[in-house]
């Protein structure tokens, strides 16, 4: 802690309207450059890396292949689909030679021409590629902290199928993978019926987390898993269409979504491959987004108390905050090395600051476990251990510490 160049602040950021903005800035995870644009500082970057790792594991499990596409796009690709004119959030850039470019706000316009080069026959299908990458959008409002960025990170996956049935099969697999991802983030995401948006006339599914900081409104059933975005719910829809229970309404944030794009993009870019009978077919395309940086913001909105953030294990910057009191640096070093040797990530507060500051900062930063090395704890034969979510601390011997952190 004495070496991290960003130290937690005593006060909350003045211009912050949401909890995620207040706490992430105050604890030193992010810094706001301007509305909707943030620097991820050492602690914040560790959280992002954890979020990315969870997403990668689950995308790889269902056969996703990771790639990395450019953020700077030729205008032609966007003109081909009409999105150059119709997508209001598209940032347009002009070069000194008067050439026009777009900054990627999504990557259908890039991935479909890319796959045109590799999809020769139905034997190349199905295939799913994904990336984790920064997107640029000219959002009108960006007041929800990192939950709505003008530059933000997204995981976007695109799948290509020979038939609609094969797409439907994969669509279900992605939905299950998404639910696993959000559960690992400590979030309860509701699969929500929504409009296909600019993409298609069919329903899409949004993954919604109930939170007052969200910008959507959903109607959901308390008895079963039915949930619909108010955008498409008719005003007289007061009861669940699956089980007829009364619907509840609440604000929510969309952490991910899945779309059936049909053959619209392959048609626009003239992407065909040889079908089983040798005749050309358009592949059926699906696209699947997760807001990486938004998920980080939503985790903070859902998992905090009056003292600070309460990160779930999988995404916490460190597993343990180790606090040295009474100048016991040597004794702290011993347990620090023991923990590191066992593969546990430790944020060691070795600073020369007051006890109160150390305890307050540990709670603010929100690692799931706290270990205090003090005269008192050593006299009692060990270390004072406490989980971030619990009130009571207990004395734990060196040989039992690792078990407490599982
Ligand atoms: P929203 O309705 O919130 O604007 P969207 O429908 O435009 O979202 P997509 O274009 O499908 O979203 O993007 C995929 C995911 O990226 C979303 O589910 C969301 O989690 C995230 N996302 C979208 N816009 C932003 C933004 N401006 N800042 C941060 N994350 C975003
Ligand atoms: Mg949007």
Image (cartoon, rainbow, N blue to C red):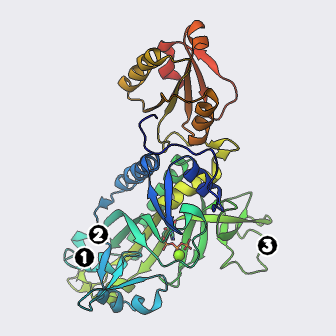
Q: Judge whether 21 appears above or below 136 on screen.
A: above
Q: Position of residue 156 (x, y in %)?
A: 40, 66
Q: Is residue 362 left or right of residue 314?
A: right
- Residue 303, how many percent across, how many down? 63, 47
Q: Earlier in the sequence, mark 2 or mark 1?
A: 2
Instruction: Check contact, mark 2 vs mark 1: CB within 8 A.
Output: yes
Q: Residue at x 61, y 33 (%)?
A: 357
Tell me residue 73's x, y (percent).
Answer: 30, 80
The CA distance from mark 2 to mark 3 is: 44 Å
Q: Is residue 379 left or right of residue 55?
A: right
Quickly name the residue at label 2. Answer: 69
From the viewer's side, name the closer residue of 313 and 150: 150
Q: What kind of element bears circle 1?
A: helix
Single out the mark in the foreground, 2 or 1.
2
Q: Which mark is residue 238?
A: 3
Mark 2 residue element? loop
Spatial CA span between label 3 and label 1: 45 Å
Q: What's the CA distance linking mark 2 and mark 1?
A: 9 Å
Find out if the beta carbon at label 3 lies less than 8 Å from the nearest ligand 1 atom: no
Residue 233 visible (yes or no): yes
- In the depicted structure, whether residue 338 falls above or below residue 172: above
Instruction: Determine whether the residue tagged by mark 3 lies in a helix, strand or loop.
Output: loop
* Residue at screen point 40% across, 19% down: 338
Quickly name the residue at label 1: 114
Q: Earlier in the sequence, mark 3 or mark 1?
A: 1
């Amino acid at each position: 802690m004495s070496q991290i160049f960003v130290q937690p602040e005593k006060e909350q950021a003045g211009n912050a309207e949401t909890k995620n903005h207040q706490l992430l800035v105050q604890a030193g995870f992010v810094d706001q450059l301007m509305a909707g644009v943030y620097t991820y500082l050492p602690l914040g970057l560790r959280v992002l890396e954890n979020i990315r790792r969870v997403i990668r594991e689950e995308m790889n499990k269902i056969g996703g292949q990771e790639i990395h596409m450019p953020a700077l796009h030729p205008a032609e690709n966007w003109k081909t689909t009409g999105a150059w004119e119709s997508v209001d959030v598209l940032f347009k850039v002009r070069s000194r030679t008067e050439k026009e470019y777009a900054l990627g706000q999504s990557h259908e316009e890039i991935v479909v021409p890319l796959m045109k080069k590799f999809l020769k026959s139905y034997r190349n299908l199905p295939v799913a590629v994904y990336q984790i990458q920064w997107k640029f959008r000219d959002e009108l409002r960006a007041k929800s902290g990192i939950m709505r960025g003008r530059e933000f990170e997204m995981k976007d996956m695109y799948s290509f199928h020979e038939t609609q049935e094969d797409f439907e099969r994969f669509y279900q697999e992605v939905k299950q993978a998404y639910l696993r991802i959000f559960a690992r983030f400590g979030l309860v995401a509701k699969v929500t019926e929504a409009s296909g948006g600019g993409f298609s006339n069919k329903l899409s599914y949004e993954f919604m987390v109930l939170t007052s900081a969200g910008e959507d409104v959903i109607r959901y059933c308390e008895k079963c898993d039915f949930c619909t975005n108010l955008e498409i719910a008719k005003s007289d829809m007061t009861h669940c269409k699956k089980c007829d229970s009364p619907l509840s309404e609440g604000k929510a944030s969309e952490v991910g979504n899945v779309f059936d794009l049909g053959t619209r993009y392959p048609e626009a870019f003239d992407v065909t491959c040889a079908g089983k009978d040798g005749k050309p077919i358009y592949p059926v395309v699906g696209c699947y987004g997760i807001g990486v940086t938004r998920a980080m913001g939503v985790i903070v909105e859902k998992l905090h108390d009056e003292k600070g953030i309460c990160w779930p294990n999988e995404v916490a910057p460190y597993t343990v905050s180790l606090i040295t009191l009474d100048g016991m640096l040597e004794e702290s070093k011993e347990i620090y090395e023991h923990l590191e040797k066992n593969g546990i990530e430790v944020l060691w507060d070795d600073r020369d600051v007051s006890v109160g500051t150390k305890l307050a900062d540990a709670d603010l930063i929100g690692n799931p476990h706290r270990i205090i090395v003090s005269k008192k704890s050593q006299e009692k034969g060990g270390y004072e251990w406490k989980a971030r979510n619990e009130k009571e601390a207990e004395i734990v011997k060196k040989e039992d510490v690792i078990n407490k952190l599982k």
